[in-house]
Image: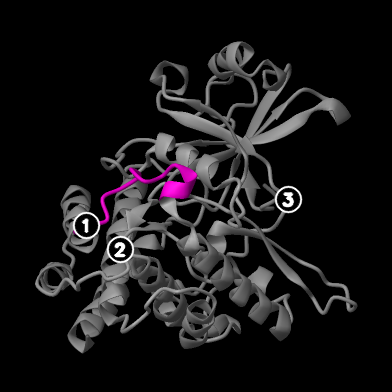
Amino acid sequence: MTDPAVVDPRTGPGADAPKGLDLDRLAAHLAVHRPELAGPPLRARLIAGGKSNLTYALRAGAGASGREVVLRRPPLGHVLATAHDMAREHRVISALAPTAVPVPAALLLCTDTAVLGAPFYLMEKVDGEVFRSRSQTDALTAGQRRGLAMAMMDTLADLHAVDPAAVGLADFGRPEGFLGRQVRRWAGQLDRSRSRPLPGIDELRDALAASVPEGVNAGRIVHGDYRLDNLLATVDASTATGGAVSVRAVLDWEMATLGDPLADLGLLLTYWDVLGDSDAAAGNPVADGLGPRAGFPAGRELIERYAGRGDVDVGPLHWHVALGCFKLAVICEGIHYRHTLGQTLGGGFDRIGDMVAPLVEHGLRAVREQ
């Protein structure tokens, strides 16, 4: 994938191996299961930007005959239960391949932890750009930013329109009670990530648990972390096309399941209107290039676009935004904790913890407004 922010720590076993990969063991595994990807030489680099699972560009062979693919594996250390399931990611992108939802082609799943110390999978490299920083989004015209935002919402509506049973995902989750389980799940993750006082977060958890809505849209495929910088997109600068925008692939499916699509909308608005309008997000790679502060349309326009394309009953979203704030606060706290233990790779982690407090504060306001 063509994110230009790439680092190469070269601290893992074997030549040119970023931390988290053992290229000798990987080459031996590929020689048996995908010999065309085994090299030699086999080289890898860490793709910066991901704050959870690790993503590497893997190149097999030399020169013009070489081929580059993408490898995904869980983070180093402190892996929260069920949060980084490679088999789920591989399964959902495989299932969505024939649909209108753009996804990379799945190439290989390895659940044998003897190879890399954790499960991993390979997928095709898709050309495009991950828009995650102001330096990228400021270079776009107002029309291009609007087009990018609307393409993001059209793609989400297309995802939620997919019939899970028609693509072999009828058993991919348990839609009944999904929202209540989300609260309990992230409360449990919080307890496993605590390393400092977090004022208000327990109050937010309890308020969410006491007011879980019905979930009338349950049973759709939910991405679980849908946002602009989990998309690969292209923007055509040609005046003839007016700066046409195309979403080339939706990435990072580790939290995908069957549930209520309003959870995706609530979390997207959390990134867009909450963090996108927070001083804590300025310069932070999680949300720096997002939202109205970065020149994009307001969240209400995104929801209007989404509602006009699909058949999901959007309704009030206050509770879902509050859930998004709680979930993202827990995720940020978990990343902050891993960073304090020296278990993160790449840059941009030193300010992740600063976002927890504003997320909790806005979540409390949202859950009181429902």
Please name the residue shown 49% across and 75% down the image.
282
Number of other residues with Cα within 10 Å of mark 2, as a class: few under 14, some 14 to 19, many 20 or more: many
Q: Earlier in the sequence, mark 2 or mark 1?
A: 1
Which numbered disc covers residue 218?
2
Whether 196 is drawn above or below 310: the answer is above
Q: Secondary structure at mark 1?
A: loop
Whether 62 is drawn above or below 132: the answer is above
Please state which amino acid type lies under the numbered disc 1.
Glu
Colouring chosen for the image of the structure:
one colour
Disc 1 marks which residue? 176
| The stretch drawn in magenta includes residue 33 | no
The image position of residue 152, as x and y in percent, is 58, 69
Q: CA distance from mark 1 to mark 3?
A: 38 Å
Which numbered disc covers residue 127?
3
Please state which amino acid type lies under the numbered disc 3.
Asp
Q: Name which quarter of the figure residue 28 lies in.
A: top right
Q: CA distance from mark 3 to mark 2?
A: 33 Å
| The stretch drawn in magenta includes residue 171 | yes
Please state which amino acid type lies under the numbered disc 2.
Ala
Please name the residue shown 64% across and 52% down the image.
5
Q: Is residue 74 visible?
A: no
Given this view, does label 1 or label 3 mark the residue nearer the observer?
Answer: 1
The image position of residue 265, as x and y in percent, is 40, 72
Which numbered disc covers residue 326?
none
The image position of residue 181, as x and y in percent, is 19, 56
Specify the segment rendered in magenta. Answer: 165-177
Q: Secondary structure at mark 3?
A: loop
Marks 3 and 2 close (CB-CB < 8 Å):
no
Q: Main secondary structure of the magenta part?
A: loop
